[in-house]
Image (cartoon, helix red, strand yellow):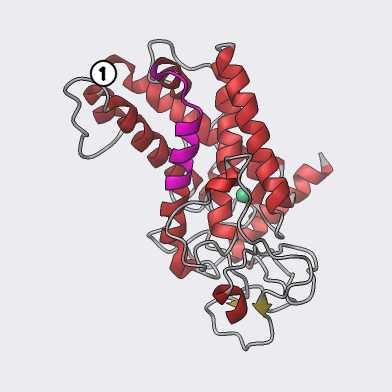
Amino acid sequence: MRSAFLLLALLLGVHTFHIKEKPNSKNHQDITKTAILRATAKVCESLDGFKKPEPLNTKTLAKSCKKDAFASNFETGIKMITYYNVQTDTDHPFSEKYHFDSESFLDGKALIIKGLEDITAYMKKKNFEDARKRLGQILHTLQDFYSHSNWIELGNKEPCTALINLEESIPNPADEKTETCDNDTPNTNTGAKIKDTILKDKILTSGYFGKSKKKGKCSHGGTLDLSTGIGRSWDGINKDAGDSSHGLLHLKAAEMAIAASMQLLEKIQTSNDDFFRLIGLYKDKPKGEWKTHFSLFSSKSRVSDASESSNEVIDV
Ligand SMILES: [Zn+2]
């Protein structure tokens, strides 16, 4: 109870002190919804006479997929999955691996792989309720990789498929001793400077958050992040929103997170029918425990990172 209160206070504090939101930012809900819509359109392409609708939304897509009657269930299914996604920030705000902070690449990947195994097992048992929950949770971690690591800064044009494939190794993660950021450069208001050698050698790193960090490592950046020291909270590399430390790359990171989420959604598809049931494009209303997010999450904060920063609040 006490810690919940403290967390709330922290969130409120962040809300108050945060730089005003810029338009043109995508949160976890936007990313998840877009990925599900695009992945569903791909599945429906195998149906006779399918034409991808413009604009692409739950209503137009349900119609094009010849499932008009299920449009509202589809909307609920997506909201449920995004709810579980956002919950990852409230359930595990300071656990590095859930957000790929502090170079926790192997632990973060392990969470995703375990989630994929669970989803497959649940789907086999037609337990779509728990599958949906796990899907939301691991999509969060997967999406955070693109705003918290330097994958985008390294110039990658495709998602890191190693995060969803057990047998594939994560390319070139920095070891503990490798310095990844020039923390002595003067504050330029454009976030931390990743070392040239890191960019040249394509070494993967991610920002440290909150507490202290090892010498020469990058910070996440943002109001709650003191890892570069007092008064230097902006010297980080996160791309959570347009006004984040490396916010100039935010939209690129968001697009990459959408593409990665689509790959994950494709990976869990066994049959079209099971996929439709999972996402709610089905005759029965999707079941699951979930709530409307409080409006607090419409504000921008690190704790609700890549994420709950835009105006879109989930409502029932
Ligand atoms: Zn996160």
Magenta stretch holds residue 268: yes
Looking at the image, the residue that sits furthest to the bottom is 186
Please, what secondary structure does the residue beneath circle 1 have? helix
Q: Nearer the viewer, residue 20 or 86?
A: 86
Q: Position of residue 150 (x, y in %)?
A: 57, 65
Q: Nearer the viewer, residue 221 or 107?
A: 107
Q: Assign the magenta stretch its main secondary structure.
A: helix
Residue 130 falls left or right of residue 53: right
Asked which quadrant contains residue 231, the reply is: bottom right
Q: Compared to 281, does 316 lie above or below? A: below
Asked which quadrant contains residue 192, the reply is: bottom right
Magenta stretch holds residue 108: no
How packed mark 1 is, by other alpha carbons closer than 10 Å (few <14, some 14-19, many 20 or more), is some
Query: Who's the residue at 18% across and 30% down the image?
Result: 51
Q: Position of residue 283 (x, y in %)?
A: 38, 11
Q: Which residue is mark 1?
A: 68
Query: Who's the residue at 50% across and 37% down the image?
Result: 264
Residue 161 falls left or right of residue 167: left
Q: Compared to 262, does 273 lie above or below? A: above
Q: Which amino acid is tagged 1?
A: Asp
Q: Which residues are magenta?
A: 259-272
Q: Compared to 131, does 9 lie above or below? A: below
Residue 152 falls left or right of residue 105: left
Q: Position of residue 249 (x, y in %)?
A: 45, 66
Query: Who's the residue at 62% across and 57% down the image?
Result: 302
Q: Is residue 242 visible?
A: no
Q: How many marks?
A: 1
Q: Position of residue 213 (x, y in %)?
A: 78, 68
Q: Is residue 198 visible?
A: yes
User: Does the beta carbon of the residue at mark 1 sit less than 8 Å from ligand 1?
Assistant: no
